[in-house]
Image: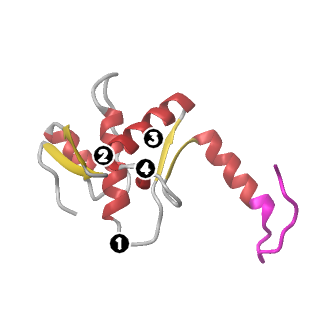
Amino acid sequence: MTRPASSSVSRVSGHQQTIRLTDEQALAAAAEDQFVNIVSVPGSGKTTVAAERFGYERYGRTDARGVLGLSFTRSAAAELNARIVSRWGSGCVAFLHWVSTFDELHVRLFQLLLDKSIDGSTIFIVR
């Protein structure tokens, strides 16, 4: 994966969008580490970096694993999702690649576990 310059341009659905990142933000967005912890003050660009990282991971992966963007609140998850879609297009947040809250993730996983047993037969359905 190549490291981006301090500003990067992407073509999404026929239009270009320029995102300006500092050198530190660009390194965090394109880091090859599996996990990146960003600690910074409000308004410093953490959500922008997270949206960039989501897209780089989504389109830069060579394996079949999905990308998951997690947040503590619904409003923060919605904001991250909106920025990802704005930057990378709606196809970026599709099957196997999604943005969620921790609570929603737990509910989805719990539902999957209750819907299927280990051998794949249905135990019972939770709705």
User: Picture coordinates of residue 81 (x, y %)?
Assistant: 45, 40
The amino acid sitting under disc 3 is Asn
User: Is label 1 or label 4 in front?
Assistant: 4
Q: Is residue 108 left or right of residue 5?
A: right
Q: Which of marks 2 and 3 is in front?
A: 3
Q: Which is more N-terminal, label 4 or label 2?
A: 2
Q: Marks 2 and 1, how far apart in space?
A: 18 Å
Q: Which of marks 4 and 3 is in front?
A: 4
Identity of the residue furthest to the right in this view = 124
Q: Name the residue under label 4.
A: 90
Q: Is mark 4 on a helix, strand or loop?
A: helix
Determine which quarter of the picture holds residue 63: bottom left
| Secondary structure beneath label 1 | loop
The answer to which of marks 2 and 1 sits earlier in the sequence is: 2
Residue type indicated by callout 4: Ser
In the image: residue 108, left or right of residue 42: right
- Quickly name the residue at label 3: 81
Q: Where is residue 77 in the image (x, y as percent from the top left)?
A: 50, 36
- Secondary structure of the residue carrying numbered label 2: helix
Residue position for label 2: 52
Q: Residue at left 17%, top 46%? A: 8
**Which residue is farthest top?**
42
At 22% from the left edge and 40% from the top edge, which residue is drawn?
Answer: 25
Asked whether the beta carbons under mark 2 and mark 1 sit within 8 Å of each other, the answer is: no
Instruction: Magenta stretch: give its range.
Output: 113-127
- Closer-to-camera residue (32/12): 12
Which amino acid does the dot numbered 2 rest on? Glu
| Mark 3 vs mark 1, CA separation in Å | 23 Å
Gap in angstroms between the C-alphas marked 2 and 3: 11 Å
Viewport quadrant of the N terminus: bottom left
